[in-house]
Amino acid sequence: MDPAVCWTGTANGAWDENTRKQYPNFEGWVAVSENTLQDNDPNNDLTPAGAQRLFMWQRRRAGDIDKYDFLMDASFGGPFPLISKPLGNLRFFLTHFRERDMFVFPLSRDGFNENQTQLKISSDITSNMKLVINSLYGEVRSATQYNWTVTPTGDVLRGVSQIADLANDAEVLYIPGYYTPTDIYRTMVGAKLTHALGPKSFYEANIQYNRSKYNSFQTTLRDTSRIYQPVPGYYADEAPFGYWGYSSSAIDGMSLGGWMNLGRDESELSTYTFKFDFVSQLNETNELKLGTKVVYNDFNIISRTESPSMSTWTRSMVYRVYPFRIGTYLQDKLEFEGFIANVGLRLDYSNPYIGNYQLSTYDDYYKAGYGNELEAEIPTDEPKADWYLSPRLNVSHPITVNSKLYFNYGHFLSEAQSAYRFRIQRESNGLVTYMGNRNLKMEKTIAYEIGYEHNLWDLFLLKLAGYYKDVANQPGWVYYRNINGTVQYNISENNNYADIRGFEIMLMKRSGQWISGFANYTYDVRTSGYFGLLEYYEDPNLQKEYLRQNPTLTRPRPQPYARANVQFHSPDKYGPMFLGFHPFDKWRINFLADWRAGSYYTYNPNSIPGIIDNVRFRDYYNIDLRIAKSFSVSRLDLQFYLDIRNLLNTKYFSFAGFSDSYDRINYLESLRLDWETGDQKGNDKIGDRRPDDVPFDPLEPNPDNDPAIAARNQQRIDSKSYIDMPNIQSLTYLNPRDIFFGIKLSF
């Protein structure tokens, strides 16, 4: 659109080299016009001005955010009129939650919307027996990003950074239906019975049903009637609006159809849960707890991508499975003078209810033309249930009136995500590309913690703790390919692990007339990796090439973080009264501060073997503020509050601002890193930025240490003008200061 370059192109000399690097190359509307005149199609002949007008028409979608974010949470409860007393003090509690979070730019939906209504009904059946019935209905409306692989059910877009990362393609910005609209409907109903068997024992029985229904669908079909006249004498359809599954291009080459709105999902997930717990105080030193929980699932997955023009863009995940799991525990709480311990044992049992298909590594039934017959032709083996006994131990030992030592130890189990266990993904021709492993073992974490707590002057609690977690059996995908590439699929295995250790220091002031809060510092070191290989090739040459390119072992990198919350509050009825109110009482001023050390990043433009984690991000820090004032009138409590997120309006770098990989490389190359030489050597980190009012002025090469060049470079270094910022300026920072006003009414 810039008159300096739009007619004859960005290479016409009107822009300097640095400006050209910030924008795509463009040949100019004169050249575009000539192409329309020379293609032997008289229906698309355009002048340069006409071509520009058509470009504007095809990008006419506005990205304005014209709706506000909001969150509403309301509840109301009490006895049922007339029937409450005869039905055991029958009472209800009704809540409704509604939220709208607008996207940073609109997609097929302009924001994330969620609403949820819950009803709780309680009755005292007898003096020692209580029944509670719960029900819930909720809806989520958003959009789904279906990538080259089928996105798992229920993965919807929401966060600002998640949306902004999509902005590199013009189609995403200008075609409303590029990503699929998705609705999720959630239903829950359950009942809990609590029965006191005496002054020392009681039990709870809980039964619950949950259902989630997904709907990802095609947007409204495009009207392809050429009834619009964006340029006098030139007729066009309503593109880019409406769904069009066939190849179609705008005047500048932007795709107007084909790879868009691919997602379809009609999956339904149901879960039945039964839980029973029994507690009894056997004597002064022993409290016994035991219980069991049974979970039965019905996963009916119907998730696919669909394209009418390209079979390679059509693939599916369709399967129905009924896994179940059981957890049973027994725990004894031992209390002696100077010693308290919880000693327990838990049994976890998981059964996929269906075994794996009896296939060899490079079986023909992974191939195109065979994969669609998999369920009908290939038997499954016996399902392999997984079970594990987990010890638990928690010990607390007071050593003085004001201090204690404690130790926690336990084994903790969790099932792998169902996609790792049951996923079967196929191309339209039957080629199997993903195969879940139904015999995966449960993920296991062995955790240790030892700590010391001390009461300081009856005002503060000081806590010192060290921890270690050994995580095993994490699932991951492993790729297999036969000699000629007719078989190429991923299968899940328990091949990943993690090692987490660190220590934390915390100082807390839990109560106080004027000040309360806490401060925490955690030094955290994490190592993760995998066993075996991630890719297997039947061709030995390809296998050798993979092994040659993947020799690097990662090493642990510490990333400490800290968090503090300080609240100033004034007492009830503090200060003088004015017009029946105390203007200085019930004030709450809350500061929440976060700091996190910058993570590591590998920048290796020359592909030097062994280079890893050689660049760091800037440290992250943030302060949020909340101010609240409450008023009480009779039985009514009214609170006005102000939330300010990112109080200091600190700017943090977002990779969403890079227009492409070259833009990202230009930024990284402009940084002065500690392993470079000459004037280019420095201590920059990813996230360092050039001030908005400083024009870009790169460092000059200075191989001979010329004093004049060195002086000019020093000026550039002092002003940070040498940093080549991301091209998409509007998405470079995604955390502006947000100010929220709210009202809370209680009666």
Image (cartoon, helix red, strand yellow):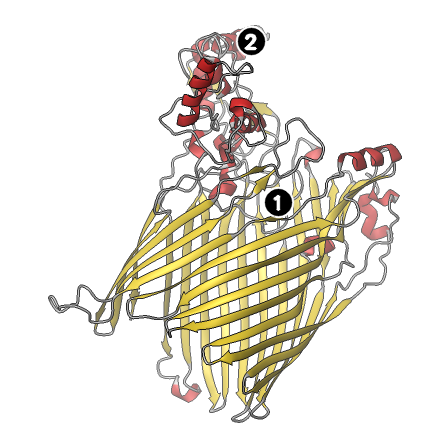
In the foreground, 404 or 218:
404
Q: In which quarter of the image is the C terminus?
A: bottom left
Residue 96 visible here: yes
Question: Percent from the top left, x then y, of residue 233?
Answer: 44, 13
> Under tag 2, what secondary structure?
helix
Q: Is residue 410 above or below residue 284?
A: above
Question: Percent from the top left, x then y, of residue 145?
Answer: 57, 41
Query: Which of disc 2 and disc 1 is earlier in sequence?
Result: 2
In the drawing, what numbered circle is on residue 35?
2
Residue assigned mark 1:
264
Task: Tell me: 642 left or right of 61.
Answer: left
Question: Percent from the top left, x then y, of residue 388?
Answer: 74, 69
In terms of image quadrants, where is residue 316?
A: top right
Q: How far apart are marks 1 and 2 (CA)?
A: 38 Å
Q: In which quarter of the image is the N terminus?
A: top left
Q: Is residue 340 above or below residue 302?
A: below
Q: Is residue 615 above or below residue 718?
A: below
Task: Tell me: 674 left or right of 77.
Answer: right
The amino acid type found where label 2 is placed reads Asn
Q: Could you tell me which residue is drawn at 60 percent across and 75 percent down?
A: 394
The amino acid type found where label 1 is placed reads Arg
Question: Percent from the top left, x then y, of residue 190?
Answer: 55, 73
Q: Residue furthest left?
A: 579
In terms of image quadrants, where is residue 79?
A: bottom left
> Under tag 1, what secondary structure?
strand
Please tell me how crowded label 1 is: few (under 14), some (14-19), or many (20+) other residues with Cα within 10 Å.
Answer: many
In the foreground, 418 or 691:
691
Residue 233 visible here: no
- The tally of labels here is 2
Q: Is residue 371 above or below residue 90?
A: above
